[in-house]
Image (spheres, rainbow, N blue to C red):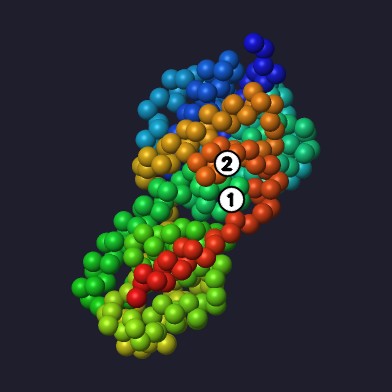
Amino acid sequence: MEYKIKTVGVLTSGGDAPGMNAAVRAVTRAAIVNGMRVKAIFRGYKGLIDGEVQEFTTQDVSGIIQRGGTILKSARCEEFKTPEGRKKAYETLVREEIDALIVIGGDGTFTGARNLAQEYNVTVIGVPATIDNDLWGTDSTIGYDTALNTIMDCVDKLRDTGTSHERVFVVEVMGRDAGFLTLNAAIASGAEAAIIPEKATIAEQIDEALGQGRRKHKNSAIVLVQEHAIEGGANKVAEMIEQAHPDYGTRVTILGHLQRGGIPTAADRILASRLGCHAILSLLDEQRSIMIGMQNGNIAYVPLAQAIKQKKDIGTDRWNALHMLSI
Ligand code: ADP
């Protein structure tokens, strides 16, 4: 059977996320199994502009499913945000005879891909990979589960010392504009509070978390703070807690890039493998400008424009659970 798409290009871009390698492996192998050639593009859009392209065989993706980071490297590329940059990128696609581009990344990566598709009628497919889980149209993104587990492990360790010294630990968590990582890590680690941008004012959240009489019997607490919930992040929150409760000793921990690394969990490897395979299957289906999402355990094709534009709702169920359980 003759397919229209003969060669696919694949790249990883934006913030790296554990499980990106599993997605690269899946895209590569599914493409080859379905009779396509695969060209790996290194360093995201920068490599696309500079022509850093190498043909991949199935062996090139051997032994990578368990590795964090991305063997294709990632980069942030300002030039791709300009029409001139995207023109150069398009010229690479033409020169390398790449008929479809699979981009593994987050919101910014998809925005770039959509712009390229609009300007040059290129077929692009997005595979969602970001620890922030902030893309609309997919229940989870590649890397999110691993990051959650990493944060939970760190908070477990902090709690040991927190209870020994009767302190309030204020822990800063990544997440860009979204509180998914912070809220879910707070539930998983039994934290007293999660301070996230989606919910009430920060002062109210601190009060709610620490100030109520029914919680007074507690002599230590863990408060998780989404990095952009408040200017100054965890340091600012610690300052506010000390002002409101001068008797509490606070300590700040900023988890930072620890959260991006590590061996991907089984859930992330399986998600990456399924999404990567379906990126190729969607091409056989003549799809374009879509993100491959996972909704209620099923693969979903989501228009890229929607995945980028719509904001994923954090809901109230988890928020309520955290508050019920943190007394
Ligand atoms: P993520 O994909 O994880 O959200 P970024 O926001 O850093 O990461 O975006 C990754 C890359 O995507 C950027 O470095 C840039 O090359 C490209 N990009 C982001 N926004 C745009 C845009 N508006 N137009 C074109 N390219 C963009």
Residue 187 % position (x, y): 39, 62
Along the line of sight, which residue is nearer the eye, 77 or 318?
318
Residue at x 28%, y 79% (from the top left corner): 218
Q: Is residue 79 visible?
A: no
Image: 112 above or below 220: above
Residue 37 % position (x, y): 58, 18
- In which image quadrant can residue 168 be found? bottom left
Q: Residue furthest left?
A: 164
> What element does badge 2 sit on?
strand
| Mark 2 vs 1, N-terminal side | 1
Residue 118 vs residue 133: left or right?
right
Image: 224 above or below 202: above
Q: Is mark 1 within 8 Å of ligand 1?
A: no
Q: Which residue is mark 2?
A: 293
> What element does badge 1 sit on?
loop
Image: 64 above or below 224: above
Q: Is residue 38 visible?
A: yes
Rendered-image quadrant of the N terminus: top right
Question: Mark 2 belongs to which amino acid?
Answer: Gly
Residue at x 73%, y 38% (from the top left corner): 116
Residue 205 % position (x, y): 48, 77
Task: Compute the Cα span from label 2 to label 1.
Answer: 9 Å
Image: 306 above or below 173: above
- In contact (CB < 8 Å): disc 2 and disc 1: yes
Residue 202 % position (x, y): 51, 77
Residue 135's disc is 1
